[in-house]
Amino acid sequence: MPMLTFAFCTYKRADRLARLITTIRAQQCPVSFEILAINNNSPDNTLEILDQLAKEPGTTLRIVTETEQGIVHARNRAIAESLDSDILVFIDDDELPLPGLIESAYHAIVNEGAECVGGKVEMDFSDHIRPSWLGDELLGFLAAVDHGDAPFWIEDTSTPIWTANVAYDMRIFRNDPELRFDKRYNRKGDDIGGGEDAILFRALLEHNIRLRYSPDMVVLHAVEPWRLKRRYFLKLHYRAGIRHGRNQLPDYPQKLLGVPPFLFNQFMRQSIKTLSMLVRGKSGHLRQAMNAAHTLGTIIGYAKRDGATHHD
């Protein structure tokens, strides 16, 4: 019978761990499973709390500390620690799995032949007031996922699934040791963004991995108050732009100040449009400002790509 590992990476969220572990232990699973906690040098009492929880009855909790800082290193450590399992389920430490998540993941992989399956990520605003400006079109930037109530095979990037709620057939990682989260998209400590799961998602598509969406896999994502600020969305896109410019754009032969001129033109157009929409009080100005922030980050990232040292 297959063995399943339910993993999460954690950093400085000790106050959430007891409820998280309790909720995972309440999951029904057709096979034996373990819980794997990857502590990424949390400066709070995370290890103390995890040690206490490991002694409680129920599903085994295995604790590993990854000393190299960053979410990519923590996620890759979870993969390395789970290579003997048949299935690896990932969620984040600011989420709670709803009933049926493991069963749905198991069914998609074992019975439907999926090699990777992901589900819904629902936003939880119960502890904080949702700002009036935060429309549904922006929830995806808080990791929300909802592709409907019917399962389907994922064919392209228009219906992504994220590590906030995803499961893998571990053969894909055992068969290809190079298929891992990309260290160039590492996010350390309290930083935001990263995009490592988006890059892996694209890599899975390129490798023709059988990807499936399962609406019965659901997690509840707690939205922390510091994310409910306009500046968070701007910074998120700026950071994403830096990584895009540094790692993804081709080497353009024509440059101005080390950057392709079209990026300057694009930034100016987007900035003027943002200002115009703001002055006229037109809806969507935040989304337009996010586009401008991404392009500005792309300019900075491209300028740094020739061996410069960066700390983002």
Image (cartoon, rainbow, N blue to C red):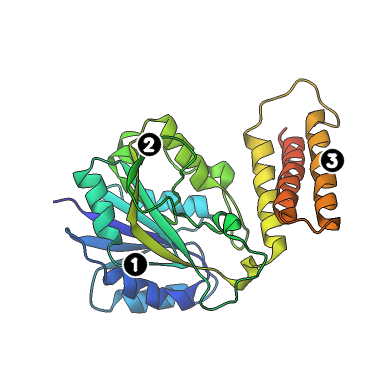
Residue lying at the far left in this picture: please name it. 1
Q: CA distance from mark 3 to mark 1?
A: 45 Å
What's under tag 3, amino acid-wise?
Met
The label nearer to you, 2 versus 3, is 3
Q: Are marks 2 and 1 in contact (CB under 8 Å)?
A: no
What's under tag 1, amino acid-wise?
Leu
Front in this rendered view, residue 312 or 155 = 155
**x%, y% of residue 198?**
51, 44
Q: Earlier in the sequence, mark 2 or mark 1?
A: 1
* Residue where numbered disc 3 is placed: 268
Q: Is residue 286 left or right of residue 30?
A: right
Answer above or below: position of 261 versus 132. Answer: above
Q: Is residue 149 left or right of residue 276?
A: left
* Residue where numbered disc 2 is placed: 177
Residue 177: quadrant of the picture? top left
- Report whether residue 65 is seen: no
Q: Earlier in the sequence, mark 2 or mark 3?
A: 2
- Report whether residue 6 is seen: yes
Q: CA distance from mark 2 to mark 3?
A: 43 Å
Q: Is residue 213 left or right of residue 267?
A: left
Residue at x-position 31% and y-position 64% = 35
Q: CA distance from mark 2 to mark 1?
A: 32 Å
Q: Secondary structure at mark 1?
A: loop
Q: Secondary structure at mark 2?
A: loop
What's under tag 2, amino acid-wise?
Pro
Q: Secondary structure at mark 3?
A: helix
Q: Are marks 2 and 3 in contact (CB under 8 Å)?
A: no
Residue 49: quadrant of the picture? bottom left
- As drawn, the label of residue 98 is 1
Q: Earlier in the sequence, mark 3 or mark 1?
A: 1
